[in-house]
Image (tube, grey):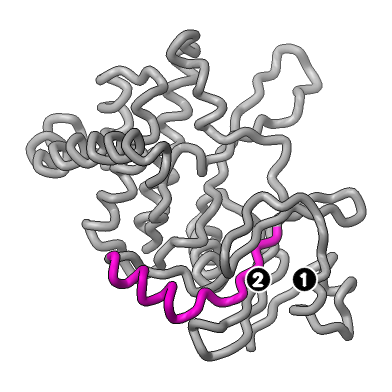
Amino acid sequence: MKLMLQEPFRTLWAGKDAFAAVEALSGKVYRAMPGRRTLRVEIEGEGYFVKIHQGVGWREICKNLAQGRLPVLGAGQEWRALSRLQSAGVPTMTVLAFGEQGLNPARRRSFIITQEIAPAMDLEAYTQPWRESPPAPAEKRALISEVARMTRQMHQAGVNHRDCYICHFLRQDAPVPSKPTEKTAPRLFLIDLHRAQVRASVPRRWRDKDLAGLYFSALEIGLTRLDRLYFLRAYFAKPLAALFRQEASTLVWLEREAARLQARQQKYGGRL
């Protein structure tokens, strides 16, 4: 069994069964599916997100493997990914509690609790008006640069997301400045890493899948070709001439894969 508790849960659950205590938490349920539940709870005025995994069963594991998908076996994947990202300096969620119990992967119980990032808005919602009301070029380029930097750092840290869409980047504004002349700077946080993989280094195949997911998720927000090139130059940290020469096959594949994801989304009504 693995168990890590920080405040306030270390004090709240002192002398208690943490697995029973987390099951007793109540709040707004954001997602409920077989073997996994996500909810938001409030404790002493502070918000927390709780993910509880009950084990998916051998049938679900075999189904995922038969479809060429790696099954999510518990909260351990997200815990390891968040730990690696924090060590690498990638802004992400703060883990305050984690528990894992059981050796059988089909019946393993686990949970993870992270501190709420608020006030914040995901980039999918934030950029929705961009097609009709484009932002100032400086703001758009700043966000593109930050997403590229965070994605590059994530991959350099040996983590690939597997759900790398702009909706999993939260934008949080800095506090209102005390002086009218001061500027606020948006901060981005990478979230929802329950499917992430952690290795010594990310294989190119999984790196490119993350990049294609980002490209696909930004197709409808009014980015120009120059905006896309700006992202690629920032992510690969290369001049465009070298990028076109060294990554030509990657760029062609990204265009094709983003179009495939878009067609699949349209066919299945938003499901990927």
Tell me if mark 1 has few (under 14), some (14-19) or many (20+) residues whose alpha carbon lies within 10 angstroms of its own.
many
Q: Which of 53/34 is in front?
A: 34
> Is 146 within the magenta?
no
User: Which residue is at a point 42% across and 51% down the rendered structure image?
Assistant: 163
Which residue corresponds to mark 1? 22
Residue 235: percent from the left, percent from the top? 32, 40
Tell me, yes or no, if residue 234 can be seen here: no
Q: Badges 1 and 2: C-beta atoms under 8 Å apart? A: yes
Q: Amino acid at mark 2?
A: Phe
For marks 1 and 2, the one nearer the N-term is: 1
Q: In the picture provided, is 9 more to the left or to the right than 208?
A: right
> Is 64 within the magenta?
yes
Q: Which residues are magenta?
A: 50-67
Mark 1: secondary structure: helix
- C-alpha separation, residue under disc 1 versus residue under disc 2: 8 Å
User: Which residue is at a point 51% across and 61% down the rendered structure image?
Assistant: 194
Q: Quadrant of residue 265?
A: top left
Q: Which of 164/270 is in front?
A: 270
Q: In the picture provided, is 60 more to the left or to the right than 108?
A: left
Residue ranking furthest to the right: 44
Q: Amino acid at mark 1?
A: Val
Q: Quadrant of residue 199?
A: bottom left
**Residue 130's disc number:** none
Residue 19: percent from the left, percent from the top? 74, 79
Q: Quadrant of residue 52?
A: bottom right
